[in-house]
Structure formats: C-alpha cells, structure tokens
Image: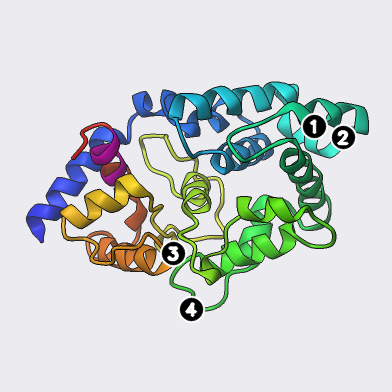
C-alpha cells in the first residue's frame, strides 16, 4: 500500500504541472481570469471533452470565439441575432441545438439560481460522501421546463448509474486547489474530500492494472469504488490522483 501510494504521489506531481494545461481541455477556462468566465468556459469545455483531444481544443476555442471570448457577458446579454451563429457549432453529437439550449439555460442559472457554484452546491445533502446529489441537483435545474430531448444526453446523471466523467472532471477543476495551479479552487461550497474521481477508459484501465478497481464497467458504482480506494491514500483530496491515472493512461500507455 505504501509503495502504491508513493507511486501515485510521484505521478500526481509529475503530471499536475503547467505544461499539462496546454494539451488539456482545462486550458480553455485558463484563458480567463473572471470567476464566471472560468466557470462557463470550463463547463462548456468539459461538456465536449470526449474524442480526439486536438479536436476538443479546436472546437472549444471556436465556441469561445463564437461567444466573443467573453462567455459570462455573452450568456447574460446575447440577443437572438447573437445566438444565430451558434447553430453552426458541432462537436461529435453536440450540435447547434444543444449549444443554444446550453447558453439560454446558463442565463437562467446565473439570473435565477445564483450561478454555477450555487447550482451544484445547493444539491449537497448532509452526510454526502460524494458529489452524486450535487450533480443530480444541477441536472434537474438544467432541464426545467421545455428542452430538446436530444440534449439530455449531454448532462449525465450519476443517480441513473452514469460515471458522469465530464462533470466530475469539471468539479475537480472548480473545487480542488494546490500549489501547482492546474485546478482553480474557485468553489468553497463543496469539499475536495467529497469529489468523485473522473472515470474513463484510460483511467479505468490503469486503475484496474494497479489493483485500485475491480469492477469492469465504467459506471457510478465503479467511480465510487475507485474514489473510496483513493481516499485510503488521501481522504482530504482523493481526486488529485486523477492526474496520475490519466497521465499513466494517456501519456505512458501504462
């Protein structure tokens, strides 16, 4: 156990560095300094963070340009004519219909629900050991009223069993902080101790090879199993080891 913890700590420190930012979707919110710009840019970048990494960054940067590189102002003030160019946006199965719904709903989140941080943290229940309820609460707010049925798949629900990888990653960006500066640590209403480890093919395969995860399916049960194991090594900040698992899988083909 001590040897594995030491290995994970070494890889966490190796990949949690400024050089990591440029090749990762976290580079998109790092374009901004205003809290709300970081929140919105991060959420949109995380939403389309699947597939080829170069394509993710290209399309996320294009989306910021379509929002005049001022995402908070755009979300609050975009008129119908400003939204029209968003119809052309496509990243894999995320298209213009989804994009425009996201922008309109983010407007509601900020104007009626106190912003992104509040939309997540208001869902936390006393005694929660993870962020499942926080994500589910946010999703319920996000799909209130009329919405395109096709857009539902772009905001996952851990209470339905989804691993919710992209939202767990987004929460990592917003909540945890350390001296290395990759994650932002902007949100104080959610404890880093309750964050859940983002789980995808890369991190899941590495976790299984290291004996951190027995479950074969990448679902919320696997997320819980993996995160609980990581809490044995650092109960206050378990998802810092996401850097290690991801780096080993993507950069080292472990």
Measure the alpha-carbon separation of dots 3 and 1.
32 Å
Look at the picture and state if 172 lies above or below 181.
Answer: below
Q: Which residue is mark 2?
A: 77
Q: Earlier in the sequence, mark 2 or mark 3?
A: 2
Measure the alpha-carbon separation of dots 4 and 3.
10 Å
Measure the alpha-carbon separation of dots 2 and 3.
34 Å
For image coordinates 50% across by 64% down, the residue present is 131
State left or right for residue 170 relative to residue 223. right
Look at the picture and state if 195 lies above or below 40.
Answer: below
Residue 240 image position (x, y, % from top left): 33, 49
**Secondary element at tag 3:** helix
Q: Which residue is mark 1?
A: 74
Measure the alpha-carbon separation of dots 4 and 1.
37 Å
Look at the picture and state if 232 lies above or below 148.
Answer: below
Report the mark closest to the observer, 2 or 4: 2
Magenta stretch: residue 249 in it?
Answer: yes
Report the mark closest to the observer, 3 or 1: 1
């Amino acid at each position: 156990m001590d040897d594995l913890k030491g290995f994970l700590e070494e890889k966490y420190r190796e990949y949690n560095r400024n050089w990591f930012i440029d090749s990762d979707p976290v580079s998109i919110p790092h374009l901004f300094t205003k809290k709300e710009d970081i929140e919105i840019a991060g959420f949109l970048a995380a939403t389309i963070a699947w597939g080829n990494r170069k394509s993710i960054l290209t399309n996320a940067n294009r989306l910021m340009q379509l929002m005049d590189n001022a995402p908070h102002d755009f979300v609050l003030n975009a008129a119908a004519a400003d939204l029209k160019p968003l119809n052309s946006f496509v990243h894999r199965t995320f298209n213009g219909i989804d994009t425009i719904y996201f922008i309109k709903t983010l407007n509601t989140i900020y104007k009626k629900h106190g912003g992104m941080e509040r939309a997540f943290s208001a869902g936390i229940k006393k005694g929660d050991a993870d962020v499942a309820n926080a994500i589910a609460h946010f999703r319920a707010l996000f799909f209130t009223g009329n919405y395109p049925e096709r857009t539902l798949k772009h905001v996952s629900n851990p209470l339905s069993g989804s691993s919710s990888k992209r939202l767990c990653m987004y929460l990592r960006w917003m909540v945890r902080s350390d001296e290395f500066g990759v994650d932002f640590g902007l949100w104080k209403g959610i404890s880093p101790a309750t964050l859940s480890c983002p789980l995808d093919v890369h991190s899941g395969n590495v976790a299984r090879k290291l004996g951190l995860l027995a479950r074969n399916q990448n679902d919320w049960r696997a997320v819980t199993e993996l995160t609980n194991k990581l809490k044995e090594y650092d109960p206050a900040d378990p998802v810092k080891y996401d850097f290690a698992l991801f780096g080993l899988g993507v950069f080292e083909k472990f």
